[in-house]
Image (cartoon, rainbow, N blue to C red):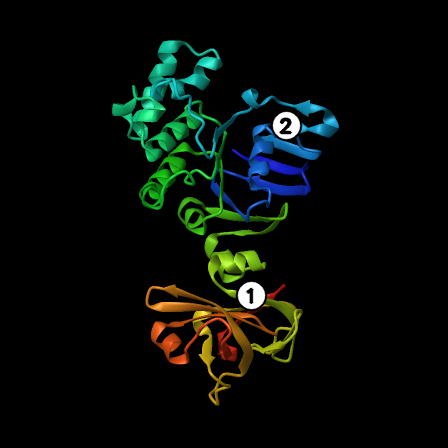
Amino acid sequence: MSLECTFTAGIGTLDLTVDLTVGDEIVAVLGPNGAGKTTLLRAVAGLHPIDTGRIAVDGAVLDEPASDVLVAPADRPIGVVFQDYLLFPFLTARENVAFGLRSRGIGKAEARRRADQWLDRVGLADRADARPGELSGGQAQRVALARAVVGDPRVLLLDEPLAALDARARSEIRRELRRHLTAAGGARVLVTHDPVDASVLADRVVVLEAGAVVQQGTMQEIALHPRSPYVADLVGLNLYRGTAAAGVVTLDGGGRIVVADRAVAGEVFASVHPRSVGLHAEAPAGSARNHFAGTVAEVDALGDRVRVRIEGTVAIVAEITSAAARELGLAPGRAVVASVKATEVGIYPA
């Protein structure tokens, strides 16, 4: 099974350009607000028109403006779980799950049997007669998932499936959702802004920014080599772009970083983990070959550690112990020097 999307679509001032193929796997689409994530799902579901290109499932074209092909949403082999689940409040859980089957002409008895079968699979057999208002957020999410997959869709789309849950419920249900998505099979695409959701739920991650795919791979691959400030922030790294020559990276934004790898040349990304950054009242005399003077902009406590954002010619984020922060008297406006060893700088082609 495969979903093929090669299209452009406009919404407001955003021009969305997508070239994506999803096989029998779970793919998470990550990106900041306004990146086009939900528009991507809506286009695949047939709820938002595309301007050019095509959308196809298993080779069957669902949308292709140039050929005047447009399959109605109800006729697409696609199941959708919306962010707020959109359950019918006046129907029971069983009736909600059976609704799509009944609307396609399947008999009442068969629709109820298949609905009960999926409610049992998601652990809600004993709540089949409950209405949405009588269900917890996690239970409502499972009903919505059962409704989306009961018709054996070849593609399953989920828009922020855990967003409506509180932090405790998200943690409890995340791995359970992974189990259900694995059982569903086919091409499964979920939109999320949470890297933890992406790590736990997805086989592959696609990063969408300003309407374009900027990076894709496993979460581990993306974390190792981020290719945009958004991805670097997502995985907690400092990221710089510049030109490398003879072990020195001249940064596009000004300044330079000394690196241990003298063989890499040309346009590169340089990454630094915040825990590799030392902070000092003045430039130290140690082995670190990179010293960046700046001013503390933010200080955030993280348990027994402190995350410090420093502004200067080379802006950088450091993560140090609370004791070290107290000793330095860190507060917004405090002048400091950040140090980084050349061996702690990751470097890879841009």
Give 85 or 41, whichever is nearer the viewer. 85
Q: Which residue is nearer to you in this view: 247 or 159?
A: 159
Residue 328 is situated, as x and y percent measured from the top left of the image, at 41, 79
Q: Quadrant of residue 320?
A: bottom left
Which tag, 1 or 2, sits closer to the chain's start? 2
Q: Is residue 101 above or below residue 337?
A: above
Where 30 sits versus 241, above or below? above
Q: Give, as a three-letter code, the residue at label 1.
A: Leu
In the figure, is residue 44 to the left or right of 26?
right
Tally of numbered discs: 2
Q: CA distance from mark 1 to mark 2?
A: 40 Å
Residue linked to disc 1: 239
Residue 8 drawn at (x, y percent): 68, 38
Residue underneath mark 2: 61
Residue at 29%, 19% in the rendered image:
129
Question: Looking at the rendered structure, which numbered label has been put on residue 146?
Answer: none
Q: Residue at x 62, y 30 (%)?
A: 48
Give the crowd class for mark 2: few <14, some 14-19, many >=20 residues within 10 Å.
some
How busy is the neighbourhood of tag 1: few (under 14 within 10 Å), some, or many (20 plus)? Answer: many
CB contact under 8 Å: marks 1 and 2: no
Residue 278 visible in the displayed image: yes
Task: State whether residue 260 appears in this view.
Answer: no
